[in-house]
Image (tube, grey):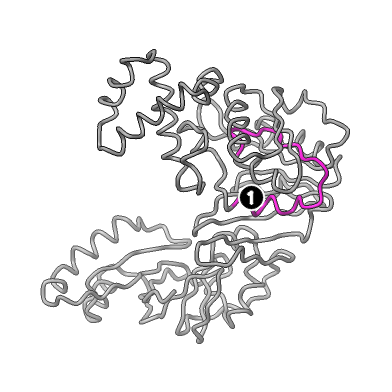
Amino acid sequence: MDAHDVDWLRSDHGARALARAAEGVASGLTELAILDRLRRDLTPEQARAVLALIEGRRSAATKFADAGALFFDRESAEQATAEAVARHTAARFAGATRIADLGCGAGGDALALAAHAPVIAVDRDPSRLALVAANAHVRALPIEVAEASVEAFVLPGDVDAAWLDPARRGDSGRVRDPEQWSPPLSVAVAIASALPRAGIKVAPGIDLAAVPAGCEIEFISHEGTLVEAVLWFGAAVTAPRRATVLAAGLDGAASLAGAPDTGATPIRAPGRTLYDLDPSVGRASLVDIVAPLLHAWRLDEHTAYLSGDEALDNPFARRFRIDSWMPFAERRLRDALTDLGVTRVEVMRRASPVDTNALETRLNRALASNRSRSGEQRVRTVALTRMGDAHIALIAERER
């Protein structure tokens, strides 16, 4: 959708066409049938815009509670920050006078930022700015838009905070070099460093050597997936490193912070419990902070599996009860699973070269006879990892 399409969709004519199309979707009509119906009294461009908005709202439904009222096409919805994540990062801007959202896209972050202060949303793409303006109107939020590149935009004098989201994709896909982002990371850092508080959204896989001294880096996982990393500056800094978990079962965010690992966690053979740490913990290098909370130890200095003899709940780890473990050999593993009466396995790994999908398929095929002998389902997890120089397999039952 371009800016003209968005303006038309916001008109009475566009709203009526959208309502007709939504009725068609609800009644089970195909996209082709809906398009044919719309073209009876709309131009082809208008009909395509209606379908693009419907598709965008469908894509946004997993990220925004009110996606059915917001304005997205599929691409902008896929790129938008999930609302739970945006609200978490926006909380650090409480107390700001005016916030600049630089590289705002369709405005997922701007919507959250505007709950704390008026926002000026800047992007060089007028179609994205039209979406921001439409979404700000839907929620009645104080968001002003400005068309400009981040490098050329002059911050108004009353802006005392900024959120920067450099574009990290090019024509050939994901751009890994931070200095090839738009704007380059060095430019974003210069802007952030000149303000009382600021945050820069960066790739979760960023090389930590590229992180400037004096800022905080926070790694954020949402529903078990590492989705975002943020560099914090000025008054927004709370610690050298932070790992944050956002999940439906949590009341708000679970977060821990501190200095990166020094190797203080002891290394021992597996106990009765296996802990698979949330990816935010490993990326933030805060294993030494989590391990004492679990009364646990490492299996290897290079992996984020922990083990212990207690079964403790913690938002930063999935917990498994260990049945047995052994040096990895597929036949021996298969025999052990058969002896346990296991009917199905899932395979996960850390620091293992094994193709987990292929191994899982072979093991489940071999366990078919267990499934045929008993109607009872006995599911186990096989965890492949290193323990010193040994490649080991753990058979465990997921408890949390």
Tally of marks? 1
Residue pushed farthest top? 43
Check residue 206 for magenta coloring: no
In the foreground, 2 or 321? 2
Image height of 27 relative to 234, above or below: above
**Residue 188, how many percent across, how many down?**
75, 36
Furthest-right residue in view?
157
State yes or no: residue 87 in magenta.
yes
Name the residue type under label 1. Answer: Ala
Q: Where's residue 149, x and y in %?
A: 71, 24
Residue identified by numbered label 1 = 229
The C terminus - image quarter: bottom left
Residue 113 % position (x, y): 69, 45
At a point 61% along the width and 63% down the height, the residue shown is 253
Q: Is residue 34 left or right of residue 110?
A: left
Q: Is residue 62 above or below residue 252?
A: above
- Name the residue rendered at 78%, 45% in the picture: 198
Q: Position of residue 261 (x, y in %)?
A: 68, 67
Q: Left of 11 or right of it: where is 230?
A: right
| Relative depth, front residue between 180 and 44 | 44
Give the residue drawn at x 42%, y 26%: 16
In the displayed structure, 209 sits above or below 171; it is below
Residue drawn at x 50%, y 33% is: 72
* Residues drawn in magenta: 85-107
- The picture quadrant where one finds residue 330 is bottom left
